[in-house]
Amino acid sequence: MKTISYYVKPFVVILGITLTLLFNCQTDKYQEKTAETSQLAMATTEYPMGPVLFPRREGQTHIDSLYETSFYLEDLGNNDYNIIVYMGLKEQSYYASPNSSHTYKGRFIFDVETDDKIQLFDALSEKTILKEDIEPHCNGYGANWIRQNTFYKQPFHLNTSEDFYIMGFIQFTIEPRCTKEVIPFGITNKDGNLKIAITKC
């Protein structure tokens, strides 16, 4: 005569296999999540003002004791692109947002040549946490101070497939050193290969 255990045993085996697979899957997800958290913690430790959002690339990154800035191109499709400017801050440094009052001459400025080759559209966008703060130094004007790592995006439309080279720059006053910083860059289109890089002048 067959006992209840005879009928129950196969279900117990199947249940055991299912739980084992589920546990292994959850373990893998936990390990992936832990790795992501560790990478973020490492980035935040190296850059207390916020994790690094973009990798450094040769010719596209300028490094200073108080900040570093990098330039990138983002392909949006249909000959539309973003110029991305990444600003990483160090040693409790800060600067004025481009959204600050025009009376504050040290605010962040983005400028690029425009002709029949490229056409800018939409305004320069800023991705960060803004903290309005009025401080008396540097002529006493108030500003929206940027105190965390930030990136800017300027969209443009590519009007030609011809080779060209255009120049631009960013300018800002880095605090508390109170020095004017100017970083020039160039956009090159060569044989259909669009690139951006920091230039010397």
Image: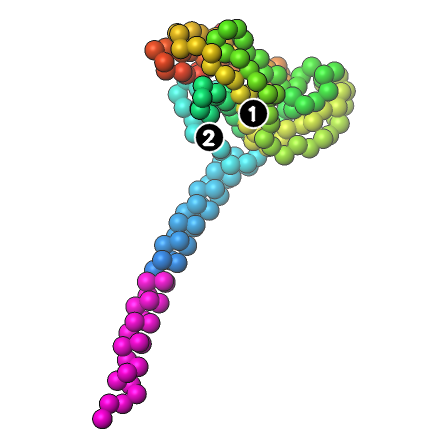
> Does residue 171 lie above or below 86 as drawn?
above
Q: Within 10 Å of the Cα at label 2, are there few (<14), some (14-19), or many (20+) other Cα atoms? A: some
Q: Position of residue 137 (x, y in %)?
A: 73, 21
Q: Which residue is drawn at 36% across and 58% down?
A: 25
Residue at 49%, 33% in the rendered image: 52
Residue furthest to the left in view is 1
State which tag comes first along the sequence, 1 or 2: 2
- Is 31 displayed left or right of 128 in the figure? left
Q: Is residue 9 left or right of residue 108?
A: left
Q: What residue type is labelled 2?
A: Phe
Residue 147 at x, y percent in the picture: 62, 31
Report the residue at 66% width, 19% height from top: 107
* In magenta segment, residue 33: no
Nearest-to-viewer mark from 1 and 2: 1
Q: How many marks?
A: 2
Q: Give the residue at x 39% y 49%.
A: 32
3 drawn magenta: yes
Does residue 32 appear in the picture of this structure? yes
Query: Does residue 129 appear left or right of residue 199 in this picture?
Result: right
59 and 12: which is toward the camera:
12
The main secondary structure of the magenta stretch is helix
Q: What stretch is highlighted in magenta?
A: 1-23
The one nearer the camera, 173 or 159, is 159
Q: Residue 133's spot in the image, x, y percent? A: 73, 30
Which residue is denoted by mark 2 in the rendering? 54
User: Picture quarter containing residue 7?
Assistant: bottom left
Residue 14, label in figure: none
Mark-to-mark CA distance, 1 and 2: 12 Å
The quadrant of the rendering that contains the N terminus is bottom left
Residue denoted by label 1: 152
